[in-house]
Amino acid sequence: MLTHGFVPHKHVFTSVVKACSSMGSAFVEGVAVHAQIIISGFGCDPFVGSALIGMYSGCGYLRAARGVFDGITEKDTATRTAMLSGYVGNGDVEGAWEVFDPMPTRDVVAWNARMIKLGLQPDRITFMGVLMGCSHAGMVDDGWRCLLIMRRMYKIEPRAEHYGCMFDILSRRGYLVEAHNLLVRMSFAPDIFVLGALLHGCLIHGYHKMGLHIAEEIIELVPEDKGRYVTLSNLLLMLGNREAAFGVRRWMEDSEVTRSSGSSTIEIDGSVHEFIAGDRYHCRTAEIYWMINLIRDSLRPSEYFLPQSM
């Protein structure tokens, strides 16, 4: 478009930035698009800025994302939510609160007052970001307040993903009884995210009997999730029911059920390489395993002598 003399509209720029974000390997191209956005006069646009914030945050460049955020003169709910989600996604809870509440007292009530003062109307995505922040920081009371403000003040009914965050908050801090009571009070059947958060808390804090029931519910809900069968077997072992645990393992072997192999990706010189556990199909497999063996050998403990006295 540029070579033919056409200046792209801001919606075009936004789509291109989002495409760069989703590709992962196109970060350099995304920076180039950002430069063209500034040249075209859309650098302060909140719509385009939200996309840029998401791109930089997704790549871990929070300073660049914050630079875009600070450069937007008229920040709307979408812009603040994008910056909030960026901070939360990178584990910077303090930065997330700072977006909405620069005052020393940082809680959901103060945040809500700040939103009202700014004349902003938070939506489900905004509250999702706040709940994620509460989850990262282990802020149980603020999580409850967030759900309360969401329902009573803004008349927004929490969805499964909001409850999933609340279950994660409670489970991380060991409030499994409260989490189970919330599960009973929910107006809809729990999904895999809610049950998964609760199961994770049961495993961490030793609620094995509750975890066993949750694992069985998850298997009924998602029978193709192979990893849950392993969790079920482990829970049975923890409860001392070795026969049932080995029965699950034997059933997995007889049914040829195996856990899905984990995968990871890495970008080198603009090309994305994907690796699967036990993978030997890469074009440079021999070199990769040679290096792995070299690293493993160098990490083996060598003989050394501790001095008898200093």
Image (cartoon, rainbow, N blue to C red):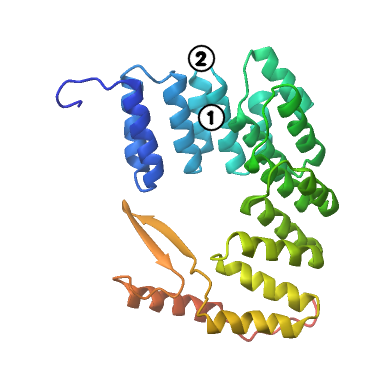
Horizontal side of 5 relative to 254 (left or right) equals left
Does the rendering let one see residue 142?
A: yes
Image quadrant holding the C terminus, namely: bottom right
Callout 2 secondary element: loop
82 to 193, vertically: above or below: above
Q: Could you classify mark 1 by the number of other residues whose Cα lies within 10 Å: few (under 14), some (14-19), or many (20 or more)?
A: some
The residue lying at 63 percent from left, 44 percent from top is 91
Which is nearer the eye, 155 or 48? Answer: 155
> Which disc is residue 66 wearing?
1
Which is nearer the eye, 201 or 178? Answer: 178
Please, what is the three-letter code of the amino acid marked with disc 2?
Thr
104 to 163, vertically: above or below: above
Asked where in the image residue 211 lies, by quadrant, the reply is: bottom right
Asked where in the image residue 299 lies, by quadrant, the reply is: bottom right
Does the rendering let one see residue 301?
A: no
Asked where in the image residue 39 lies, by quadrant, the reply is: top left
Q: Position of residue 198 (x, y in %)?
A: 73, 55
Are dots 2 and 1 in contact, CB under 8 Å?
A: no
Q: Position of residue 166 (x, y in %)?
A: 73, 43
Label 2 vs 1, first from the N-terminus: 1
Give the distance between the C-alpha atoms of the residues marked 2 and 1, in whole angstroms: 13 Å
Q: Position of residue 306 (x, y in %)?
A: 73, 81
The residue lying at 63 percent from left, 65 percent from top is 219
Horizontal side of 273 relative to 1 (left or right) equals right
Callout 1 secondary element: helix
> Which disc is residue 73 wearing?
2
Please, what is the three-letter code of the amino acid marked with disc 1?
Arg
